[in-house]
Amino acid sequence: MNAAAAPRDWTAAERRMWRAMRAGKCFEDDAAVRGQVIRHLLLTPPTPADGQMLHLRAKGIRICGVLDLAGASISIPVQFEECVFDAVPVLDHAKFPSVRLVGCALPGLSAEGVVTEGDLELPSCRLSGELNLAAAKIGGLLNLKQASITASDEIAIDADGAAAGSIGARGLRCEGSWFLNAVVTGGVFLDEARIVGEHAFIQAAQMTIGNGGFYARGGFRCEGPVNLAYATVEGPIALDGAAMANTGDKAFIGVGIRLASYFNATPGTVFEGTVDLTGAEISGAVDLSGARLTEPGPEGAVQLARTVVQGGIALRSVRVAGPVDLTRSRITGGVDLAAAELSGRGSVIAAGASVSGDLDLRDSTLSGLLDVSTAVLQGDLHLGGAELGQEAGTSLRARGLIARRLDFSPARPPGRVELDHGTVTILADQEASWPARVGQVTLDQFAYRSLVSDMTIQKRLAWLAAGTPHAEPGPYNQLATCLRAAGLEREAGRVLREKLRRTARTRGLIWRVWGALQDVTVGYGYQPGRAVVGVLGLLLAGMVFFSRVACGPAAGLCPVKADEHPTWDPFVYSLDLLIPLVSLGHDTAWDPVGPAKIVALVLTVAGWILVTTVTAAAARTLNRP
């Protein structure tokens, strides 16, 4: 219902405000107006002058007493500019087309459950108490641009259960906590905002944000954690140039978040505490390149364990004081840690991770462990120029790793390197990159198809020896298979001979002697020319010796039967002694005595040894792949 005239008991200033409202004008004055008068104007507005639309606009006035509009249904827009409220306005559960307070000073604002069809704006306002927007329903923008809110208690802004089209709070200064478990269909824009004070934090767990995303860039600072755990965000999260501090605990909490776009916190971003994205599902990339992370909690600096990322992870040139955890994460794309510096407990833990691209740590510096055990990389593991630290003496734990290529060329030899049960298509390394001490590299069942290296075969054998302190045969077989596939049959044979040599040394005395005989005579079957040389040498020695013996005036040995023997021939006799399985009729026709008997015995025994070792070597050669 409209009023035809202002009540008689109103002050002159209040009647002037009535007339300005009726004329559709802004009431600009420095006078005091009672809160109950403004309530009357809103609930029983004046009849508008011809052609004018009703709205309440005031600038510079002082509102005395409480403006109590709790539960009211207001049909006209409301705007106060540069006004001062002596008491906290009460808008709880009221309904408005829109509310706009610009540059006003208030001891707080109670608007729990308020409903606006359009915007609720408080740009550049100064609140010395709580802004209560719990369960508010704002059809348009919640505008807190350049506002200053100082909590009288711990809570500065309570927007739990609220709903809004978007939230704009660029340059906001909020001293106290902000509860923001709300539904925002557009975006949240907090660029240059500052959340400060002893109780500073943003609590937005389980918040829903539309495709406008969450922006807190360019000077945004929160002196406590920002908590978006289990939130759903249809747009990006952009934190470029922001600073968040929660020393020794979590600075940004995105546990279980569902993000339909990217997560950015690029150069200039500072986290004093842990960035926790454990179990998050992120449809875009995660980019922390150039960010600085210090004073993390006990769980590490960057938590991405069990995270699903569709666009890769970039931590290039990041400065991190603590571990980066990628345990059992699923990453479409690569993980870029090139030139990163991880100090303190600076480990990279990617055990069980699945990465469709590369894991790149070129020129990075780790003070702790690199753990890629049981990880699956469809791309390469790059360690060129990296400086690997140690944890309990171990620098690289890659047990069960599967990768296309392992580029092992760190800047300096690291501590212990564990490659057991790993599989890579290409092993690219440098001689100077591996630990020199025996037992510092473990190679049991480590498989690779090809080698790219500056190491000679002799150096590679030394590498195998250092990595197999118990003479495990598997690594030797693997190297031989790789060399044979490259057409290096001779080098493969040398590797297998070294395997048999080392295996023999680990057994008892008889096996060691037997192995030494096979090694000297035929090189374990991989140097058959040695047997030929040995036979010819023994044959020549026997022939020379027996050509000088005589039986009385006759040359040669005395026959067993004087009237029944072949013609003496020292060559044939020596050959018959050396061939134990075939008789030429000479070894039994002559009767050696004295030194000749000893030489004959030596040739016979040598023949048996040669035949046995050659047979064993031949069997091994025939059975190898």
Image (cartoon, helix red, strand yellow):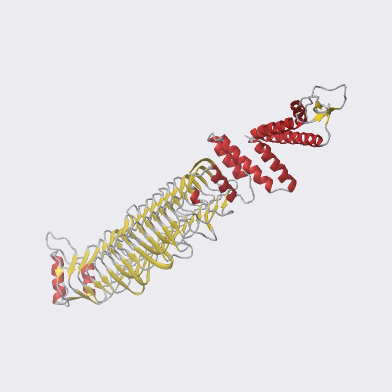
Between 64 and 625, the residue placed more toward the observer is 625
Q: Which part of the image, by quadrant, shows the C terminus?
A: top right
- Asked whether residue 291 is in view, the answer is yes
The vertical placement of 396 against 586, above or below, is below
Quarter location, residue 124: bottom left
Q: What is the residue that sits farthest to the front in this orientation?
A: 553
Query: Where the N terminus falls, by quadrant?
Result: bottom left
Residue 44 visible, this angle = no
Say which quarter of the image contains residue 547: top right
Q: Position of residue 519 (x, y in %)?
A: 67, 40
What residue lies at 42% left-to-right and 55% top-to-bottom? 364
Q: How many marks?
A: 0
In the picture as drawn, the residue positioned furthest to the left comes out as 50
- Say above or below: 564 vs 595: above
Which residue: 81% across, 22% down?
Answer: 566
Q: Nearer the viewer, residue 247 or 349?
A: 349
Closest to the observer: 20 or 199? 199
Residue 431, compared with residue 89, is above or below; it is above
From this view, report whether residue 144 is shown above or below residue 565: below
What residue lies at 58% left-to-right and 39% top-to-bottom?
Answer: 480
The image shows residue 85 at horizontal and vertical percentages of: 24, 74
Q: Percent from the top left, x then y, of residue 475?
A: 59, 45
Is 375 displayed left or right of 533 in the figure?
A: left
Q: Is residue 534 left or right of residue 56?
A: right
List x then y, in percent, for residue 615. 71, 33
In the picture, measured across the screen, residue 277 lies left or right of residue 561, that is left
